[in-house]
Image (cartoon, helix red, strand yellow):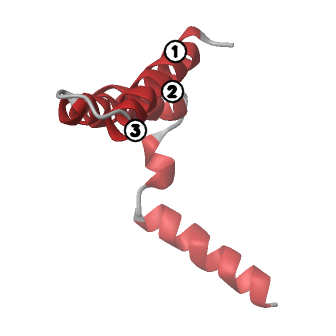
Amino acid sequence: MKPIKIITFIAFLASFTSIVCGLVFALEYSQKLIGFGVLGLFFVVFPLFSYYRWKDKDVKDYMLTKENLDKMRENQRDSIN
């Protein structure tokens, strides 16, 4: 496995565990556990996951340019016939 994938998985487990512990246990800092878990998901896990999934891809393939719109129209015509 790649290191970025392992780091992402560990950060996800830590955030998820923090949220679950905050919800299950009646501690005086339960809301802080939930909050830190949510912050971890949005500011650590999601950016790492996005980087891991997009690092070798070309963004131009996913943009609606005239060239890509023409390809989509051509593929649609081919699928109808």
Q: Quadrant of the N terminus?
A: top right
Mark whose residue sits in front, 3 or 2: 3
Say whether marks 3 and 1 touch (CB < 8 Å): no
Outermost residue, bottom side:
81
Q: Residue at x 35, y 41 (%)?
A: 23
- Marks 3/2: CA–CA distance: 32 Å
Please count the marks in the image: 3
Amino acid under disc 3: Val
Q: Which residue is mark 3?
A: 24
Q: Which residue is mark 2?
A: 52
Q: Could you say whether the residue bearing mark 3 is in a helix, strand or loop?
A: helix
How far from the left and from the top, in percent, is residue 17? 44, 28
Rendered position, 76 above or below 50: below
Q: Which residue is mark 1?
A: 4
Say whether marks 1 and 2 touch (CB < 8 Å): yes
Q: Residue at x 59, y 72 (%)?
A: 72
Q: Residues within 10 Å of mark 3 (few under 14, many from 20)?
A: few
Relative placement, left or right, of 31 versus 48 is left
- Marks 3/1: CA–CA distance: 30 Å
Residue closer to the observer: 9 or 47: 9
Outermost residue, right side:
81
Residue closer to the observer: 64 or 22: 22
Q: Could you say whether the residue bearing mark 1 is in a helix, strand or loop?
A: helix
How far from the left and from the top, in percent, is residue 15? 39, 28
Amino acid under disc 2: Tyr
Q: Quadrant of the C terminus?
A: bottom right
Nearer the N terminus, badge 3 or badge 1? 1
Q: Could you say whether the residue bearing mark 2 is in a helix, strand or loop?
A: helix
